[in-house]
Image (cartoon, grey):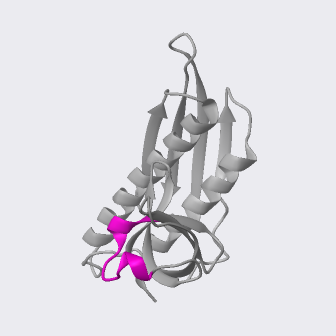
């Protein structure tokens, strides 16, 4: 489904040091966008450290631009809350989530497409289950770890779940990372 001819994302770092963790997150989020977007030609990301506003908080601004046939899509988010690494990740996730919404809207309004876009159905195995607390982790078939909650179960009994149980789910991206929705037994 993903084309090899698509260029990898370009990251520009301003007033902050490059981070391999952020580069990995960018790669994951970009691959997810490519699932929704036909004709994505390239992606430019600018990660910018901003001066301190308060005594200890330094903010970060992330701008993501998708180059498409026709007009490009751009989203920019700014965060200054806590630690530097968390702020960059939060700003990056928010910018990519905004772009995902724009891309879905563009796709729905493009002649010949129409209809609703659904996240692809994933499969995986439960690797951690905290029954008393109502949450767990599932390892998708491609190796990613995804969080899920008891509330996300569609038609399964929470008591039937155990470590090693195969599940079907759709992945969504939240402020703290990926989580599973529409979880059911595979």
Left or right for 153, reference 42: left
Residue 18 visible in this rendered orientation of the protein: yes
Q: Position of residue 44 (x, y in %)?
A: 59, 50
Q: Give 26 or 127, whichever is nearer the viewer.
A: 127
**For this rendering, which residue is in front, 137 or 7?**
137
| Residue 105, placed above or below residue 18 | below
Q: Residue at x 28, y 71 (%)?
A: 108
Q: In this view, does 56 lie above or below 141?
A: above
Residue visible at 67% across and 41% down? 12
Q: Nearer the viewer, residue 134 or 16?
A: 134
The residue that appears at 64% across and 59% down in the rendered structure is 27
| Residue situated furthest top in the rendering | 55
Left or right of 101, for residue 3: right
Instruction: Identify the image quadrant of the N terminus.
Output: bottom right
Above or below 109: residue 160: below
Q: Could you say where residue 48 lies in the image, as x and y percent from the top left? A: 60, 31
Q: Quadrant of residue 102?
A: bottom left
* Position of residue 85 measured from the top left corner of the image (x, y, whole percent): 63, 37
Q: Can residue 120 be seen in this view?
A: no
Image check: 97 left or right of 63? left
Residue 46 figure quarter = top right
60 versus 71 height, above or below? above
Q: Where is residue 59 in the image (x, y as percent from the top left)?
A: 54, 25
Residue that appears at 30% across and 63% down:
105
Q: Give the range drawn in magenta.
A: 148-160
The verdict on residue 24 being magenta is no
Q: Which residue lies furthest to the bottom in this view?
A: 186
Q: How many marks?
A: 0
Q: Which of 53 and 2 is in front in this view?
A: 53
């Amino acid at each position: 489904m993903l084309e090899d001819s698509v260029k990898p994302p370009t990251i520009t770092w301003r007033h902050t040091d490059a981070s391999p963790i952020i580069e990995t997150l960018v790669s994951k989020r970009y691959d997810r966008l490519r699932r929704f977007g036909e004709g994505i030609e390239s992606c430019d990301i600018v990660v910018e450290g901003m001066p301190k506003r308060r005594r200890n908080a330094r903010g970060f601004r992330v701008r993501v631009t998708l180059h498409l046939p026709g007009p490009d899509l751009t989203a920019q988010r700014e965060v200054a809350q806590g630690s530097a690494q968390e702020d960059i990740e939060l700003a990056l996730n928010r910018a990519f989530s905004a772009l995902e919404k724009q891309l879905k809207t563009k796709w729905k309004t493009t002649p010949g497409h129409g209809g609703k876009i659904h996240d692809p159905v994933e499969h995986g195995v439960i690797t951690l289950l905290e029954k008393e607390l109502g949450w767990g982790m599932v390892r998708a078939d491609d190796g990613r770890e995804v969080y899920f909650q008891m509330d996300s179960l569609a038609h399964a009994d929470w008591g039937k779940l155990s470590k090693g149980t195969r599940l079907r789910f759709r992945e969504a991206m939240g402020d703290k990372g990926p989580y599973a929705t529409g979880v059911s037994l595979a």
